[in-house]
Amino acid sequence: MSDHAPASNAPASPVKSMDAIMALCKRRGFIYQASEIYGGINGFWDYGPLGAQLKKNLRDAWWQDMIMRPCWGKQGPGGREVRCVPLETCIVQHPRVWQASGHLAGFADLMRKCPKCGHFVRADQLWDTIVQSSEWFASLIQEFEPSPEGTQTPQMNADRLLKWARTKGKKLAPNLALVRNPEVTLSWLVTRVNGQPTAPPDVIEILRHLATEQLNATGLQDPCTRCGAVLGEPAPFKLMFETWAGLTQTEDNKVYLRPETAQGIFVQFKNVVDTNRIKIPFGIGNTGKSFRNEITPRNFTFRSREFEQAELEFFCPPDESLEWYKFWRDFRMEWWKSIGLAGENLILREHEKDELSFYSQGTSDVEYRFPFTAPGFGELEGIAHRGNYDLTQHQKESGAKMEYNDTERGELLPNGQRRGERYLPHCIEPAAGLDRGVLAILCEAYTKDESRPSPEFMKFHPRLAPIKAAVFPLVAKDGMPEIAEKLHKELTDRFWRVGAIETDEKQTIGKRYARMDEAGCPYCFTIDSDTLKDQTVTVRDRDTGSQERIGIDNVSGFLADKLQV
């Protein structure tokens, strides 16, 4: 799936600074680079105290709304009850699981390796990578003049290109043909531009000319994103992490870290049916870590090598599957809106026919406009109609019978019962990435308002906020700390299951409010001199900064109402 879906027609708000969001995440303990004291390890991230609670709250919200009370008690197609059960499966599965699923044979990206610097790049992302992150391209493109109106061919000045090749190019792209042999390379390009082409060259064709030294012998070639050398041919690169189970590290003992949680559900489908009094249609939900050996992890936690998924496999009769697909597609979009992603940054995109897997009758993506994908969108969750492909594959590979005996279908018998019908159920798969979900929540919540005393704050939905409330004594004397401590304990005893209750008596009250704003705490309760007189406290709202007085005995009820718990 592309990280950069097309932009919507709706006007976008100003793009937030990803650097500012990442800085706040580090400063306030949402997300850290894994193994940071050793220089970090690319593609792996740790969650700090606030991030761990935020992620837990997102996971719990998914669990509650997908497993414990699916779809908030809504009825499915035909007035059917939506029923789901939980499952927890191992990270390491039998290797034949991945043989059956097709991951061993086909779970690979085509990669291209630079023979000079050894850098790898995904073949299908080469030009996006060059345009977005190549240092030498960013420098070289400044030597071009804008394209004349109505064309895609930028204006070029040979003298400027020669000067760049002999100065900046030697440092930034020493292996680019333009740098190695500028006169010959430019002569090929001038011939192309000044000839009578059917269409003038665009930027990509021009760059390919600048990467090609022996045009007649090789044809146009593609440059390395780092050093400019001609890239090797595309070759498959396995995305699955390999390890061994047993005493010897041989092919016979090789196993894999799972690239998705879904296959564990499919291989346990028969056991779930046999050991639970549950009938189709029903879903099996699973959350947990998955691993993919991404060549170019990027964009903070968006594309990582270790990540957490929340997946549901919903099994239904084949003739009802399209209705259930539409039901889950619409609900999952509604769910993301309900936890704070409502607005122009969230879209539901139905896949075109040429995007669908051969076994799929429909797939939609819930997509979010991240700062690094703007004005386009990045995938947050996929809702796929998988047919009976997975159960069929595991039935063939394992020999186990996966058919479901549906006693509510089939011919009506004289005794009033149904004969029953055996079939392989179709499956609808809403598959969400929890790490991407947390990232989207962080990006959406990040708000900057220079008119406020504390200009940065995190506008989390109260259900997800890692800190639900803070209790502050205005000053650390006159009995205020003791009252604050008592109220803090009361709120902690009631709300500890949904998040933290903070207390702090150091620094000015304004600085304490600012710290809670950055942490995304929705409400602060301040004990002051009036509390000693009339047993009221000041409530400060994070989003508006407004304040009101309420009775100290009403604080717990006030917070419960706001948090809806």
Image (tube, helix red, strand yellow):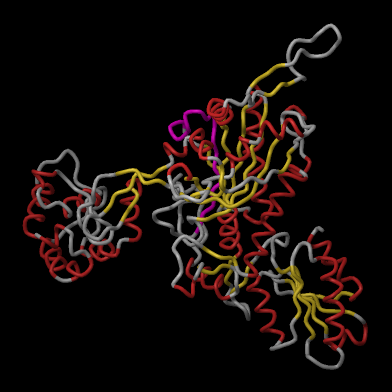
Q: Quarter-wise, where is residue 83 in the image?
A: top right
Q: Residue at x 50, y 46 (%)?
A: 256
Q: From this viewpoint, which residue is outermost toward the bottom?
A: 478
| Left or right, residue 480 beside residue 509 | right
Q: Quarter-wise, where is residue 484 in the image?
A: bottom right
Q: Residue at x 45, y 35 (%)?
A: 355
Q: Position of residue 300 (x, y in %)?
A: 48, 62
Name the quarter where the C terminus is drawn.
bottom right
- Foreground residue among 187 and 429: 429
Q: Position of residue 214 (x, y in %)?
A: 9, 49
Q: Position of residue 111 (x, y in %)?
A: 33, 48
The answer to whether residue 83 is above or below residue 142 is above
Q: Position of residue 379 (x, y in %)?
A: 51, 48
| Left or right, residue 70 beside residue 314 | right
Q: From this viewpoint, which residue is outermost toward the top?
A: 414
Whether residue 358 appears in magenta in the rendering, the answer is yes
Q: How many marks?
A: 0
The answer to whether residue 281 is above or below residue 517 is above
Q: From this viewpoint, which residue is outermost toward the front?
A: 247
- Foreground residue among 331 and 238: 238
The answer to whether residue 419 is above or below residue 47 is above
Q: Quarter-wise, where is residue 553 in the image?
A: bottom right
The answer to whether residue 386 is above or below residue 205 is above
Q: What is the span of residues highlighted in magenta in the rendered image? A: 353-370
Whether residue 156 appears in magenta in the rendering, the answer is no
Q: Residue at x 88, y 79 (%)?
A: 536
